[in-house]
Image (tube, rainbow, N blue to C red):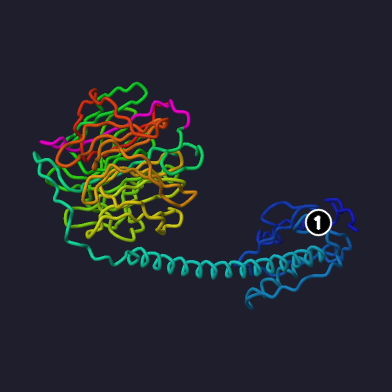
């Protein structure tokens, strides 16, 4: 039980907090202290004062409980924790202090000594905790450093040791000469595919869902026979009209385009004499072009895929004449820079790619020896390419698009120009044929615009294909559309993408 504090005027005790013989080292922090307050005594390191003389009042024992350091009452006969000083000098100083306090009030001396012992024990415990944390931090720092070394090693050595073939399907045509042979196509996704409308059955494309978002198909650059192009044609299926887009800063074919946010990117390609690593960025809000970070490698006939959730662009495969690439680069807009991605299992030139269900699909292409029917898939969260079912035909310089939860591959080249079309059903894990296009074509564009599948541009033989076709879901066949409104009806090797309207 705590006993009440004596009044401040009690004999001798009212002076306990004052300096002894004028020496402030004995005062409790230099403050006038009374009973019921905190005795927070801090002895001076240079204190060597003699024990002050004690009056009869000071030497009288006290049985009154006093307020301890934590604000609670401590009885005079409370057990005192032993404190072991670190040095003889400290021991001597503490002894002098304690003797001085005992002359004033033995209870105060015992309370202060007990409190000091507790605080020193707590300090010792905390010091041990700090040491343990420092050891853990050192160990974790070593593990992090080792993991960084391992990741760097894997990044530099995971690339497959594929021998780059010196044979290419064609040289980049000079300006003024019509392109021949296998070329390029790439796909740039513009967002999520519509919800599935039912299972796919061979020979048909599932009926589209409700459209009406006024999406537009942009064709950027390419070749028009005698010259390479910097112009842009924009097709709006909602009203069947064509219009001109903002001219690119330079001519470019064999490129790839994709939408990320409210920016349109065109990466790589060629200009009739040079292969490019540069990338252009168009603001869809103000229609102004600017230079974005260049890829690490000059590449054309590649694929460019936008990952909207990750906020990234992936440039995959492609290459240059006499050099087919298996490399992958990832563009981070906030750093305006490209970084190495997981390489493809084999080189893929004149390839196409699409983004479906959170995965990147790479379809066909040319590996330096032959055209491919193989398809590989990668989940960016895993970073590993896995094979899926092969297409029904080998294809290069073809086009693909995501439609209604499916992948659609159209046209291309495998030694001859193709009109065939096939669809990948991810639920069945297989490909099935649908009605062929009216005209064979490669190096063109195939896109899902407002829920409708369109094919346009490209070449057949040495002639530009001027036909615009749309898949008719009622007749399960392709329907030719009037393209006379196009500003440049002859356009092969373009980059293309689907642009959503401003909301």
Q: Nearer the viewer, residue 7 or 369?
A: 369
Task: Tell me the quarter of the image containing the C terminus.
Answer: top left
Expressed as whole percent of the image width and height from the top left, the position of residue 44 reads: 62, 64
Q: How many marks?
A: 1
- Residue at x 44% of width, y 53% of height: 379
Question: Is residue 370 rendered to the left or right of residue 193?
Answer: left
- In the rendered structure, does residue 222 fall within the stretch colored magenta? yes
Give me the residue at 32% from left, 38% from top: 446
Q: Is residue 314 left or right of residue 70?
A: left
Q: Position of residue 122 (x, y in %)?
A: 68, 66
When asked about the image quadrant of residue 385, the answer is bottom left
- The part of the chain drawn in magenta is 209-228
Residue visible at 85% across and 56% down in the picture: 11
Name the foreground residue: 72 vs 399: 399
Question: Quick one: quadrant of the N terminus?
Answer: bottom right
Circle 1 packing at 10 Å, graded few (<14), some (14-19), many (20+), is some
The quadrant where residue 376 appears: bottom left
In the rendering, at what x and y percent does residue 372 appear?
29, 55
Magenta-span inclusion, residue 402? no
Q: Is residue 499 above or below residue 156?
A: above
In this view, the residue in front, 280 or 186, is: 186
Q: Secondary structure at mark 1?
A: loop
* As drawn, 392 above or below 209: below
Q: Which residue is mark 1?
A: 72
> Whole-percent x and y of residue 435?
35, 39
Residue at image position (17%, 61%) is: 166
């Amino acid at each position: 039980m705590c006993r009440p504090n004596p009044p401040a005027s009690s004999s001798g005790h009212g002076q306990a907090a004052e300096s002894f013989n004028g020496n402030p080292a004995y005062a409790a922090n230099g403050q006038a202290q009374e009973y019921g307050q905190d005795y927070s005594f801090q002895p001076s390191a240079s204190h060597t004062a003699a024990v002050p003389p004690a009056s009869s009042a000071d030497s009288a024992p006290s049985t009154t409980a006093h307020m301890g350091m934590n604000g609670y009452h401590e009885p005079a006969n409370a057990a005192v924790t032993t404190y072991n000083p670190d040095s003889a000098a400290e021991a001597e100083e503490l002894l002098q202090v304690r003797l001085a306090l005992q002359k004033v009030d033995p209870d105060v001396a015992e309370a202060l000594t007990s409190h000091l012992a507790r605080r020193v024990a707590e300090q010792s415990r905390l010091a041990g905790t700090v040491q343990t944390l420092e050891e853990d931090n050192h160990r974790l720092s070593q593990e992090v450093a080792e993991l960084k070394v391992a990741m760097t090693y894997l990044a530099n050595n995971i690339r497959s040791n594929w021998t780059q073939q010196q044979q290419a399907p064609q040289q980049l045509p000079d300006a003024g000469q019509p392109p021949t042979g296998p070329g390029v196509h790439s796909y740039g996704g513009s967002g999520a595919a519509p919800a599935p409308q039912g299972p796919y059955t061979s020979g048909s494309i599932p009926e589209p869902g409700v459209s009406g978002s006024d999406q537009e198909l942009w064709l950027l650059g390419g070749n028009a026979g005698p010259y390479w192009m910097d112009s842009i044609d924009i097709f709006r299926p909602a009203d069947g009209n064509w219009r001109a887009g903002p001219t690119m800063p330079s001519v470019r074919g064999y490129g790839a385009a994709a939408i990320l946010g409210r920016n349109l990117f065109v990466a790589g390609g060629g200009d009739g004499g040079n292969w490019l690593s540069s990338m252009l960025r168009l603001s869809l809000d103000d229609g102004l072009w600017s230079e974005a970070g260049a890829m690490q490698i000059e590449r054309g006939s590649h694929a460019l895929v936008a990952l909207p959730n990750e906020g990234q662009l992936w440039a995959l495969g492609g290459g240059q004449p006499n050099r087919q690439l298996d490399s992958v680069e990832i563009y981070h807009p906030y750093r305006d820079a490209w970084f190495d991605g997981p390489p493809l299992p084999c080189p893929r030139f004149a390839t196409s790619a699409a983004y479906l269900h959170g995965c990147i699909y790479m379809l066909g292409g040319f590996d330096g020896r032959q055209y491919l029917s193989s398809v590989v898939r990668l989940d960016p969260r895993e970073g590993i390419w896995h094979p899926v079912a092969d297409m029904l035909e080998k294809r290069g310089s073809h086009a693909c698009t995501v439609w209604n939860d499916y992948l659609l591959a159209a046209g291309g080249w495998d030694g001859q120009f193709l009109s065939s079309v096939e669809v990948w059903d991810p639920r069945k894990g297989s490909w099935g044929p649908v009605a062929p296009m009216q005209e064979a074509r490669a190096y063109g564009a195939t896109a899902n615009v407002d829920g409708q599948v369109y094919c346009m541009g490209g070449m057949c033989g040495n002639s530009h294909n001027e036909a615009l076709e749309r898949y008719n879901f009622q007749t399960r066949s392709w329907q030719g559309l009037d393209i006379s409104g196009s500003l440049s009806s002859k356009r092969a090797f373009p980059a293309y993408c689907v642009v959503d309207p401003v909301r």
